[in-house]
Protein backbone atom coordinates (compact mmCIF):
# COMPACT_ATOMS: atom_id res chain seq x y z
CA UNK A 1 0.00 0.00 0.00
CA UNK A 2 1.30 3.47 -0.78
CA UNK A 3 0.35 6.68 0.96
CA UNK A 4 -2.68 8.38 -0.56
CA UNK A 5 -0.70 11.55 -1.18
CA UNK A 6 2.32 9.95 -2.80
CA UNK A 7 3.08 11.23 -6.28
CA UNK A 8 -0.27 13.03 -6.53
CA UNK A 9 0.95 16.65 -6.59
CA UNK A 10 -1.14 19.50 -5.25
CA UNK A 11 -4.87 18.71 -5.07
CA UNK A 12 -6.78 21.22 -7.22
CA UNK A 13 -9.42 23.48 -5.75
CA UNK A 14 -12.47 23.87 -7.98
CA UNK A 15 -13.85 27.37 -7.59
CA UNK A 16 -17.39 28.64 -8.14
CA UNK A 17 -16.73 29.49 -11.78
CA UNK A 18 -15.78 25.90 -12.49
CA UNK A 19 -18.80 24.65 -10.53
CA UNK A 20 -21.06 26.88 -12.63
CA UNK A 21 -19.44 25.63 -15.84
CA UNK A 22 -19.85 22.04 -14.73
CA UNK A 23 -23.54 22.70 -14.12
CA UNK A 24 -23.77 24.16 -17.63
CA UNK A 25 -22.04 21.09 -19.03
CA UNK A 26 -24.58 18.85 -17.30
CA UNK A 27 -27.45 20.95 -18.63
CA UNK A 28 -26.09 20.88 -22.18
CA UNK A 29 -25.08 17.23 -22.36
CA UNK A 30 -27.45 15.71 -24.87
CA UNK A 31 -28.15 12.35 -26.36
CA UNK A 32 -27.28 12.87 -30.04
CA UNK A 33 -28.77 11.02 -32.98
CA UNK A 34 -28.06 13.53 -35.78
CA UNK A 35 -24.39 13.92 -36.66
CA UNK A 36 -22.52 16.03 -39.15
CA UNK A 37 -19.80 14.26 -41.06
CA UNK A 38 -16.81 16.03 -39.48
CA UNK A 39 -14.45 13.28 -38.34
CA UNK A 40 -13.48 12.91 -34.72
CA UNK A 41 -9.69 13.07 -34.38
CA UNK A 42 -8.04 9.85 -33.26
CA UNK A 43 -6.37 11.82 -30.45
CA UNK A 44 -9.79 12.95 -29.22
CA UNK A 45 -11.12 9.39 -29.27
CA UNK A 46 -8.10 8.39 -27.22
CA UNK A 47 -8.77 11.14 -24.67
CA UNK A 48 -12.42 10.10 -24.40
CA UNK A 49 -11.50 6.49 -23.75
CA UNK A 50 -8.81 7.51 -21.28
CA UNK A 51 -11.33 9.74 -19.47
CA UNK A 52 -13.88 6.92 -19.33
CA UNK A 53 -11.32 4.78 -17.53
CA UNK A 54 -11.16 7.36 -14.71
CA UNK A 55 -14.67 6.33 -13.64
CA UNK A 56 -15.21 4.72 -10.26
CA UNK A 57 -15.78 0.97 -10.22
CA UNK A 58 -16.64 -1.67 -7.67
CA UNK A 59 -13.44 -3.05 -6.13
CA UNK A 60 -11.60 -0.91 -8.69
CA UNK A 61 -12.41 -3.77 -11.06
CA UNK A 62 -12.57 -1.49 -14.14
CA UNK A 63 -14.89 -3.98 -15.85
CA UNK A 64 -15.57 -1.77 -18.89
CA UNK A 65 -14.44 -3.10 -22.26
CA UNK A 66 -14.66 -0.96 -25.39
CA UNK A 67 -14.92 -2.31 -28.92
CA UNK A 68 -14.07 0.36 -31.47
CA UNK A 69 -16.13 -0.72 -34.45
CA UNK A 70 -14.03 -0.14 -37.58
CA UNK A 71 -15.64 -2.61 -39.97
CA UNK A 72 -18.30 -1.07 -42.27
CA UNK A 73 -19.88 -4.52 -42.66
CA UNK A 74 -20.30 -4.99 -38.90
CA UNK A 75 -21.64 -1.47 -38.53
CA UNK A 76 -24.20 -2.07 -41.30
CA UNK A 77 -25.25 -5.37 -39.71
CA UNK A 78 -25.71 -3.66 -36.33
CA UNK A 79 -27.77 -0.86 -37.89
CA UNK A 80 -30.01 -3.33 -39.71
CA UNK A 81 -30.45 -5.33 -36.49
CA UNK A 82 -31.43 -2.20 -34.53
CA UNK A 83 -33.98 -1.24 -37.16
CA UNK A 84 -35.56 -4.70 -36.94
CA UNK A 85 -35.64 -4.60 -33.13
CA UNK A 86 -36.99 -1.07 -33.09
CA UNK A 87 -39.83 -2.00 -35.40
CA UNK A 88 -40.58 -5.06 -33.24
CA UNK A 89 -40.60 -2.86 -30.12
CA UNK A 90 -43.26 -0.64 -31.68
CA UNK A 91 -45.74 -3.49 -31.18
CA UNK A 92 -45.87 -2.68 -27.45
CA UNK A 93 -47.82 0.47 -28.29
CA UNK A 94 -51.35 -0.76 -28.86
CA UNK A 95 -52.53 2.77 -29.50
CA UNK A 96 -51.88 3.53 -33.17
CA UNK A 97 -51.14 7.20 -32.55
CA UNK A 98 -48.46 6.35 -30.02
CA UNK A 99 -47.03 3.63 -32.26
CA UNK A 100 -46.77 6.09 -35.14
CA UNK A 101 -45.10 8.63 -32.82
CA UNK A 102 -42.61 5.95 -31.76
CA UNK A 103 -41.83 4.98 -35.34
CA UNK A 104 -41.28 8.65 -36.22
CA UNK A 105 -38.56 9.02 -33.58
CA UNK A 106 -34.95 8.81 -34.71
CA UNK A 107 -33.56 6.38 -32.18
CA UNK A 108 -30.03 5.93 -33.45
CA UNK A 109 -27.38 7.35 -35.73
CA UNK A 110 -25.45 4.13 -36.18
CA UNK A 111 -25.16 4.52 -39.97
CA UNK A 112 -24.00 8.14 -39.95
CA UNK A 113 -22.00 8.61 -36.75
CA UNK A 114 -18.30 9.03 -37.53
CA UNK A 115 -17.34 6.71 -34.67
CA UNK A 116 -19.06 3.71 -33.14
CA UNK A 117 -18.14 2.10 -29.82
CA UNK A 118 -19.70 -0.99 -28.33
CA UNK A 119 -19.30 -1.06 -24.57
CA UNK A 120 -19.28 -4.32 -22.68
CA UNK A 121 -19.00 -5.30 -19.05
CA UNK A 122 -16.59 -8.12 -18.21
CA UNK A 123 -18.66 -10.14 -15.75
CA UNK A 124 -15.61 -11.97 -14.37
CA UNK A 125 -12.85 -9.39 -14.26
CA UNK A 126 -9.54 -10.39 -12.72
CA UNK A 127 -9.02 -6.84 -11.42
CA UNK A 128 -10.84 -6.13 -8.19
CA UNK A 129 -10.53 -9.70 -6.93
CA UNK A 130 -14.30 -9.96 -6.46
CA UNK A 131 -14.46 -7.15 -3.94
CA UNK A 132 -17.95 -5.69 -3.48
CA UNK A 133 -19.86 -8.00 -5.82
CA UNK A 134 -20.73 -10.96 -3.59
CA UNK A 135 -24.24 -9.68 -2.88
CA UNK A 136 -24.77 -7.42 -5.91
CA UNK A 137 -22.84 -8.65 -8.95
CA UNK A 138 -24.71 -6.07 -11.03
CA UNK A 139 -22.31 -3.50 -9.55
CA UNK A 140 -19.94 -4.42 -12.37
CA UNK A 141 -22.52 -3.24 -14.90
CA UNK A 142 -23.23 -0.09 -12.90
CA UNK A 143 -19.50 0.62 -12.93
CA UNK A 144 -19.49 0.27 -16.71
CA UNK A 145 -22.38 2.70 -16.96
CA UNK A 146 -20.35 5.22 -14.95
CA UNK A 147 -17.52 4.90 -17.45
CA UNK A 148 -19.97 5.64 -20.24
CA UNK A 149 -21.29 8.71 -18.48
CA UNK A 150 -17.77 9.93 -17.86
CA UNK A 151 -16.99 9.48 -21.55
CA UNK A 152 -20.22 11.29 -22.42
CA UNK A 153 -19.23 14.37 -20.41
CA UNK A 154 -15.64 14.29 -21.67
CA UNK A 155 -17.04 14.28 -25.20
CA UNK A 156 -19.55 17.07 -24.64
CA UNK A 157 -16.98 19.38 -23.10
CA UNK A 158 -15.06 19.06 -26.39
CA UNK A 159 -18.17 19.72 -28.50
CA UNK A 160 -18.43 16.04 -29.44
CA UNK A 161 -21.84 14.38 -29.21
CA UNK A 162 -22.74 10.90 -28.04
CA UNK A 163 -25.86 8.86 -28.62
CA UNK A 164 -26.60 5.79 -26.51
CA UNK A 165 -28.33 3.01 -28.41
CA UNK A 166 -29.95 0.18 -26.50
CA UNK A 167 -32.50 -1.25 -28.91
CA UNK A 168 -30.29 -4.27 -29.45
CA UNK A 169 -30.38 -7.95 -28.63
CA UNK A 170 -27.22 -8.13 -26.52
CA UNK A 171 -26.25 -11.64 -27.58
CA UNK A 172 -26.74 -10.82 -31.25
CA UNK A 173 -24.48 -7.79 -30.96
CA UNK A 174 -21.91 -9.78 -28.97
CA UNK A 175 -21.85 -12.45 -31.68
CA UNK A 176 -21.46 -9.85 -34.43
CA UNK A 177 -18.56 -8.33 -32.54
CA UNK A 178 -17.02 -11.69 -31.63
CA UNK A 179 -16.25 -10.81 -28.01
CA UNK A 180 -15.47 -13.17 -25.10
CA UNK A 181 -18.43 -15.06 -23.68
CA UNK A 182 -18.16 -13.34 -20.29
CA UNK A 183 -18.70 -9.88 -21.70
CA UNK A 184 -22.24 -8.45 -21.61
CA UNK A 185 -23.31 -5.64 -23.84
CA UNK A 186 -24.09 -2.40 -22.01
CA UNK A 187 -24.32 0.11 -24.84
CA UNK A 188 -23.67 1.01 -28.41
CA UNK A 189 -22.34 4.56 -28.55
CA UNK A 190 -22.57 6.73 -31.64
CA UNK A 191 -19.95 9.47 -31.46
CA UNK A 192 -19.44 12.54 -33.61
CA UNK A 193 -20.08 16.25 -33.90
CA UNK A 194 -23.78 16.98 -33.44
CA UNK A 195 -25.73 18.43 -36.34
CA UNK A 196 -27.49 20.74 -33.88
CA UNK A 197 -27.05 21.83 -30.26
CA UNK A 198 -29.78 22.24 -27.69
CA UNK A 199 -30.64 22.30 -24.05
CA UNK A 200 -33.79 20.27 -24.47
CA UNK A 201 -33.71 16.48 -24.85
CA UNK A 202 -34.85 15.34 -28.27
CA UNK A 203 -37.60 13.18 -26.75
CA UNK A 204 -38.93 16.25 -24.96
CA UNK A 205 -38.82 18.36 -28.13
CA UNK A 206 -40.82 15.66 -29.92
CA UNK A 207 -43.43 15.53 -27.17
CA UNK A 208 -42.54 12.00 -26.06
CA UNK A 209 -41.21 12.58 -22.55
CA UNK A 210 -40.13 15.74 -20.74
CA UNK A 211 -37.94 16.01 -17.66
CA UNK A 212 -39.96 15.59 -14.49
CA UNK A 213 -39.76 17.73 -11.35
CA UNK A 214 -37.09 16.94 -8.78
CA UNK A 215 -39.76 16.71 -6.07
CA UNK A 216 -41.24 13.68 -7.85
CA UNK A 217 -37.91 11.87 -7.70
CA UNK A 218 -36.97 12.30 -4.02
CA UNK A 219 -38.66 10.83 -0.97
CA UNK A 220 -37.84 11.07 2.71
CA UNK A 221 -38.08 8.40 5.38
C1 LIG B 1 -29.37 3.56 -20.63
C2 LIG B 1 -29.79 4.46 -21.77
C3 LIG B 1 -30.24 3.89 -22.94
C4 LIG B 1 -30.66 4.70 -24.01
N1 LIG B 1 -31.07 4.14 -25.19
C5 LIG B 1 -31.42 4.93 -26.23
C6 LIG B 1 -31.78 4.38 -27.49
O1 LIG B 1 -31.76 3.17 -27.72
N2 LIG B 1 -32.13 5.22 -28.48
C7 LIG B 1 -32.15 6.57 -28.28
O2 LIG B 1 -32.48 7.29 -29.22
N3 LIG B 1 -31.81 7.12 -27.10
C8 LIG B 1 -31.44 6.33 -26.09
N4 LIG B 1 -31.05 6.89 -24.91
C9 LIG B 1 -31.05 8.35 -24.76
C10 LIG B 1 -32.26 8.85 -23.98
O3 LIG B 1 -33.41 8.84 -24.78
C11 LIG B 1 -31.95 10.28 -23.50
O4 LIG B 1 -30.85 10.21 -22.63
C12 LIG B 1 -33.12 10.92 -22.79
O5 LIG B 1 -34.19 11.11 -23.67
C13 LIG B 1 -32.75 12.28 -22.19
O6 LIG B 1 -32.18 13.10 -23.18
P1 LIG B 1 -30.74 13.75 -22.95
O7 LIG B 1 -29.75 12.61 -22.81
O8 LIG B 1 -30.47 14.56 -24.19
O9 LIG B 1 -30.80 14.57 -21.71
C14 LIG B 1 -30.64 6.11 -23.85
C15 LIG B 1 -30.15 6.66 -22.67
C16 LIG B 1 -29.71 5.85 -21.65
C17 LIG B 1 -29.17 6.48 -20.39
Image (spheres, helix red, strand yellow):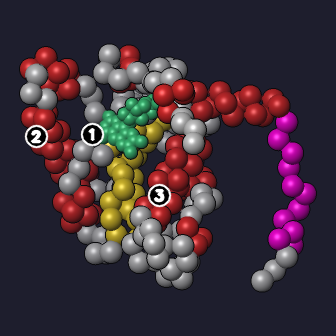
Residue 120 as seen in the image, left or right of residue 44: left
Magenta stretch encompasses residue 8: yes
State which quadrant residue 156 falls in: top right
Give the distance between the C-alpha atoms of the residues marked 1 and 2, in whole angstroms: 19 Å
Please say whether residue 86 is one of the residues in the magenta stretch. Answer: no
* Front of the two marks 2 and 3: 3
User: Real-space Cα distance between discs 3 and 1?
Assistant: 28 Å
Tell whether 152 sits left or right of 123.
right
> In the image, residue 74 lies at what x, y percent?
23, 55
User: Which residues make up the magenta segment?
Assistant: 4-15
Between circles 3 and 1, the one closer to the viewer is 3
Residue at 67 percent across and 30 percent down: it is 23
Asked if the residue at tag 2 contacts the one at tag 1, i.e. Cβ–Cβ closer than 8 Å, the answer is no
Which residue carries the number 2 mark? Answer: 88
Q: Give the image location of residue 105, x and y in percent.
A: 25, 25
Residue furthest front as drawn: 221
Residue 165 visible, this orientation: yes
Neighbor class of circle 3 (other Cα within 10 Å; few <14, some 14-19, many 20+) is some
Residue drawn at x 58%, y 72% is 59
Which label sits on residue 111? 1
Foreground residue, 14 or 111? Answer: 14
Magenta segment's dominant SS is loop
**From this viewpoint, is residue 64 visible?**
no
* Residue most extreme to the right: 10
Mark nearer the N terminus (2 vs 3)? 2
Horizontal placement of 20 versus 39: left or right? Answer: right
Residue 142's disc number: 3
**Local SS, label 3:** helix
Secondary structure under tag 1 reads loop
The quadrant holding residue 25 is: top right
Judge whether 157 appears above or below 9 on screen: above
Amino acid sequence: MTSGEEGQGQAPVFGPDFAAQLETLLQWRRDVRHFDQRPVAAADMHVLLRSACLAPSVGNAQPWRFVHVRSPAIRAALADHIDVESRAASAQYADKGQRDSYLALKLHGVREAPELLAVFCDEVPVAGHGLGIATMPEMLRYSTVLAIHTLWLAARVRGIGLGWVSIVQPRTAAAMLDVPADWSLIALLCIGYPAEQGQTPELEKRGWQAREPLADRVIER
